[in-house]
């Protein structure tokens, strides 16, 4: 048998079915399959190849009495791509459906020996991400991310949202100025957007009433935790004519319930199989005020600016799980000292500390969403910029949005990878990302 | 009447309806509306305000005998946002539905005098994009873009595609090296992706069979044409196990027909109203070979590398329109000298020149898509890198994708803004973009 015949291979590929399509077929049908070699068992006059595609695996049976001399098998190697024609037979393998091969060709070239195996370190696996992802468990977070954003869009589309594409190239370092990547923009300095915050607000000022964007955002944080990456997918939502941050939370709660229900419907079995995790659709997302949270977590987990530590988030997560049986909760009414200048101020705490009309959404003890009502009054916004001691000139373009009328507005930014990480209870967020970027990693 | 009462305004906002909802109501119902002032007509004891939201306009009638002294109108200005309670009345205005105002409050603050008007230059309008987009004609391309990507996703979702998010931060200047923005990445040089080309191919090598991405791509071209922007939305598609570039064109033709049909169903009237353009759903997209195209356009429109000029594209567009009555056509089998190293080579031209298995899709005389079958054989790909005289080291990470087995593959990159520009027959592509970026423009 000749292993290489491009013309004939192409002819066969035209009628290729997926391995998972075998389920629908009767035995003794002729089938054409394509995929890569997961394993080769050479056993003399009968040999076996496990062929895999994205949808499953099948055992190819090669018999000398059917296709002649089997010595060509020595040339094959794992992960070489094949197209085969054969007969779908009942076979004796328990784990796999079986195809008796009549014709077999290599697609492209024979694969070189693989540089990683299932025991390789995460770093090594990420170096060879395209091989790593041929494993179904490893590719599942990528597929679930695709599903999740699809469910989110279903929700947005059926609720009258407009999808926007905001510029990621900013003329000024916007939110603070630290932790921002600098771009050489025709010999001027420009900056990669840390979030579409200012521009989604601009869309609302421009008269769009409900907008969303699902796109990359960039943080130049030199962090090496299992929760941080420098390039992440942010789902950003902004709505106009709101009356408080509770309107924004209502929307987010609705979205979470809808998407969790969809995930449960479509992916419960896969999530159980690959990650051994149960899907718990929230019935009601509890709200905890920041000043109540302080009492639950204790002084050690409160940062000087009023924010709480990652450990504090986990303590609250356990408290909510024990008290309400829920994986999600809103942490609301954050102190002004812990929030950005554009959050609207709210009712003061009992001890008189200023708060904001803001919230985080915590999922299994980790913050995955930050949201707020925004300050839409130009004069008040300007005051808040000065109060925070920020560079007014850098923020001028944003401040100007509010000079010529603005409705009330609010919204949130939702970390997609963090959500998937928490959902699947994966230790390292890098496993959720197709091509993770951290301070050291720029390749592949 | 007091113009400012935040508490009461919020109370009203809770029950606000859209101006377009009036159509469904009977006269003499109480309604609450919110939006901005398009116009004020002060006429003594009866005055009028045209109130606008994203969905329409309504005439507010203010009568002294209903709400008392009308002198507060002097304080109002165009584009100030209001919330009003009133009675939906039959009225006498022909152009607008009418609401007799009972209560009226400013949302936020009074708008300052507007810096632009409908006669302002495009540059000035873009400087104040958030005001410019309050005009329905100006915001329409943004809304149509949202619709179009929605229709595309409908198509992808129902055809088994996985949505991917590829990194936009590259460790090496990939395609050529020129026209790429440089990033300061923790004191190392990194580069903004010109396209997700290499990574969508990686996804196919990784065993995903059909992937798409709709995301920004970046070109540091110092061009000031009406067709170029430095940041654009690219719809990228890649599929595995193909047999030639014709498989990719089949997919694209299907996608174009589906989305054009959806646009016609949902937006034909708006497109006629705002841009006076007819929607012409293709029945069959013709294919013209490059060597045939050369004969049609004549020598002057052929570039030295075998590419054709923008004028050449327009000539071919007219030829196709006259011959087939179609707005779209595929220009196929491009010469190797005009295509990147990763395109697979095809059958030579009659004169012996090498070609590629590639195509462009031309829409109303402008290229909006480039596609091809990719070279998936490591040894051939390496040869092609060398043949083009490219930096092998910069491309090493990409070449390595093909060492460990690869299926055949092909795909395309689709310029979303160019498509919308051509569809609406808009002169300047900047009008299609929420926040256009060119060599001079980084703001807002």
Image (cartoon, coloured by chain):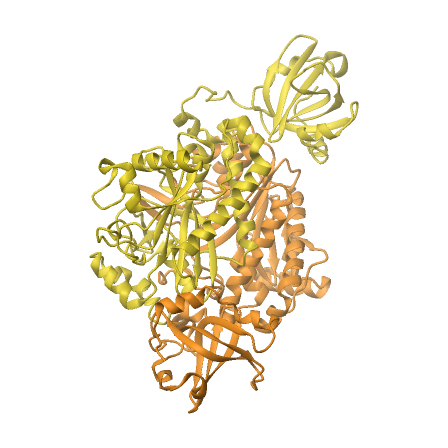
Chain colours: A yellow, B orange
Q: Is residue A339 visible?
A: yes
In the drawing, does residue B365 fall left or right of residue A437?
A: right
Judge by depth and name the residue closer to the eye, B347 or A289. Answer: A289
Judge by depth and name the residue closer to the eye, B391 or B116. Answer: B116
For the point 27% across and 40% down, the residue is A295
Q: Looking at the image, how many numbered discs can be counted on the residues?
A: 0
Residue extending farthest to the bottom is B44
State which quadrant residue B314 falls in.
Answer: bottom right
Q: Position of residue B398 (x, y in %)?
A: 47, 35
Judge whether B416 appears above or below B4 on screen.
above
Judge whether A169 appears above or below B141 on screen.
above
In the drawing, does residue B90 fall left or right of residue B104?
A: right
Judge by depth and name the residue closer to the eye, A328 or A212. Answer: A328
In the drawing, does residue B163 fall left or right of residue B222?
A: right
Q: Quadrant of the C terminus of chain B?
A: bottom left
Q: Is residue A364 visible?
A: no
Q: Position of residue A319 (x, y in %)?
A: 36, 35
Judge whether B276 appears above or below B429 on screen.
below
For the point 22% across and 57% down, the residue is A390
Q: Quadrant of the N terminus of chain B?
A: bottom left
Q: Position of residue B392 (x, y in %)?
A: 43, 35
State which quadrant residue B302 falls in.
Answer: bottom right
Q: Position of residue B191 (x, y in %)?
A: 37, 45
């Amino acid at each position: 048998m000749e292993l290489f015949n491009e013309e004939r291979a192409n002819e066969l590929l035209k009628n290729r079915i997926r391995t998972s399509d075998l389920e629908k077929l009767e035995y003794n049908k002729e089938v054409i399959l394509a995929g890569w070699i997961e394993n080769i068992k050479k056993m003399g006059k009968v040999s076996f190849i496990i062929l895999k595609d994205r949808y499953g695996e099948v055992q190819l049976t090669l018999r000398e009495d059917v296709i002649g001399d089997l010595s060509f098998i020595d040339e094959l190697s794992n992960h070489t791509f094949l197209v085969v024609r054969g007969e779908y037979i009942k076979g004796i393998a328990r784990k796999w459906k079986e195809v008796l091969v009549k014709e077999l060709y290599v697609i492209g070239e024979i694969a070189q020996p693989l540089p990683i195996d299932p025991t390789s370190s995460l770093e090594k696996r990420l170096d060879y991400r395209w091989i790593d992802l041929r494993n179904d468990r490893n590719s599942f977070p990528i597929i679930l991310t695709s599903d999740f954003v699809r469910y989110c869009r279903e929700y947005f589309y059926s609720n009258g949202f407009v999808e926007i594409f905001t510029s990621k190239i900013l003329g000024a370092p916007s939110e603070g100025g630290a932790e921002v990547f600098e771009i050489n923009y025709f010999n001027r300095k420009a900056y990669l957007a840390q979030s579409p915050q200012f521009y989604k607000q601009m869309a609302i000022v421009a008269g769009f009433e409900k907008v969303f964007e699902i796109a990359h955002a960039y943080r130049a944080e030199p962090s090496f935790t299992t929760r941080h990456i420098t390039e992440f997918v942010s789902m950003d939502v902004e709505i106009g004519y709101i009356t408080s941050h509770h309107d924004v939370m209502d929307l987010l709660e609705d979205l979470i319930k809808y998407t969790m229900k969809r995930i449960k419907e479509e992916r419960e079995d896969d999530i159980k199989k690959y990650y051994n995790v149960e899907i718990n659709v929230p019935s009601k997302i509890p709200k905890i005020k920041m000043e109540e949270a302080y009492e639950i977590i204790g002084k050690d987990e409160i940062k000087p600016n009023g924010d709480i530590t990652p450990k504090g988030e986990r303590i609250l997560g356990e408290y909510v799980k024990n008290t309400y049986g829920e994986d999600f909760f809103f942490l609301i009414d954050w102190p002004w000292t812990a929030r950005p200048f554009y959050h609207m101020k709210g009712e003061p705490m009992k001890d008189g500390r200023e708060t904001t009309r803001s919230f985080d959404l915590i999922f299994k003890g980790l913050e995955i969403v930050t949201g707020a009502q925004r300050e839409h009054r130009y004069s008040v916004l300007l005051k808040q910029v000065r109060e925070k001691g920020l560079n007014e000139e850098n923020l001028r373009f944003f401040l100007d949005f509010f000079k010529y009328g603005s409705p009330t507005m609010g919204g949130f930014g939702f970390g997609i990878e963090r959500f998937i990480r928490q959902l699947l209870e994966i230790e390292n967020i890098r496993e959720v990302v197709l091509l993770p970027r951290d301070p050291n990693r720029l390749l592949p």
